[in-house]
Image (cartoon, rainbow, N blue to C red):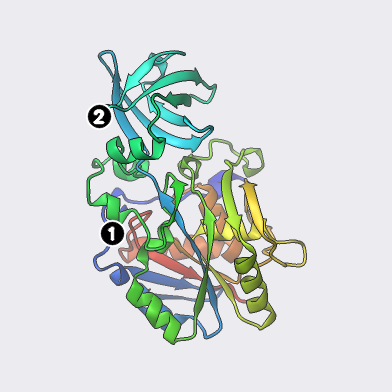
Amino acid sequence: MRVDLFDFNLPSESIALRPATPRESARLLQVNDTKIGDYHIGDLPDLLKAGDLLLFNDTRVIPAYLEGKKNNARISANMIKREGLRQWRAFVRNAKRLKAEDIVDFGQEASARVINRDEDGSVLFEFLGNEPVEILLDRVGQMPLPPYIANKRPADYQDRQDYQTIFAEKQGAVAAPTASLHFTENLLERLKQAHIDHAMLTLHVGAGTFLPVKVEDSRDHVMHSEWGHIDAVTANKINATKAQGGRIIAVGTTSLRLVESAADEQGIVHPFCDETDIFITPGYRFRVIDGLMTNFHLPKSTLFMLVSALMGRETMMSAYQHAIDTGYRFYSYGDSSLLLPNK
């Protein structure tokens, strides 16, 4: 499909730079095939049904943004993917200043050697020393805020809490599964009282989620891959919920993409432990999920194409225009939507 069909104008003031406080006070736009409704995250137990199953991503964001020097040249690096015990690939500002064997000093006894620079501009680093890289990153790194926030303000200590979900457990993501940022222990308890259950899966969100689609036709776009895991317990819980007539509601596009990757043609979910590069565009037949809770996405992005595949492009264009007109806050720290297609 033509990528420009998924374009829309978003005022810069619509981009949220901080999350709502408290988290449940964020707004929630409910969308189905025929109508939309304005609510808040705290209304979620009343908007779902007993027997529904929410799918959460328990990945944990690592402080993967580093600033350092090569001699007198300032180098900023966003670690995007682990490629070895001590090797990480990164997007680097001023990457042309780096060549193989250069040493970048990130401060506080953390430094890395350049192994190579790829054709896409990314750089492969090998961290020096014997200290686990996770400890180095935790000491010198900052939270890797998305470009549309980082270009307006630097990351600070508050982001270490704000840009992490309450489910965060398994380290490896360089971007948050942002739909889950809205959840609190109190909200989970209220959902439980409403007989709405949840299950966990893991998809380590990569920086590729923010890469723009640069082609004119979506069929020419090369989707980034991310590592995911669904264990047998979660797979069985999803299948049992479906068999009992309950709905599967993915919380976030990461959860949706992973569970759809793990399903067979009959919609049965199997344990999964692999990379996925699934690219969902209009025309895709959803095998598992019955609904999606997700924040608002960038124009012409793969994720706006995904929500258009679920709800229809015209429905989503109309819903997004309503969100813009009525002051919803967009992107990672913004408000959310609950997409429930009629079947």
* Residue 343, image quadrant: bottom right
Is residue 193 visible from the viewing direction of this image? yes
- How would you rate the neighbour count of disc 1 (Cα within 10 Å): few for under 14, some for 14-19, many for 20 or more? some
Tell me the residue at 34%/20% (across/down): 104
Tell me the residue at 57%/66% (across/down): 311
Q: Is residue 311 above or below residue 221?
A: below
Report the front residue among 242 and 168: 168
Mark 2 or mark 1, earlier in chain: 1
Q: Secondary structure at mark 2?
A: loop
- How would you rate the neighbour count of disc 2 (Cα within 10 Å): few for under 14, some for 14-19, many for 20 or more? few
Tell me the residue at 55%/62% (across/down): 314
Q: Position of residue 24 (x, y in %)?
A: 31, 71
Is residue 13 visible from the viewing direction of this image? no
Determine the residue located farthest toward the front in the rendered image: 130
Report the front residue among 213 and 245: 245
Q: Amino acid at mark 1?
A: Pro
Q: Is residue 97 above or below residue 247?
A: above
Q: Amino acid at mark 2?
A: Gln
Q: Position of residue 185 (x, y in %)?
A: 35, 73
The residue indicated by pointer 2 is: 108
Q: CA distance from mark 2 to mark 1?
A: 30 Å
Left/right of residue 16 with respect to residue 331 in the rendered view: left
Q: Secondary structure at mark 1?
A: loop
The residue indicated by pointer 1 is: 19
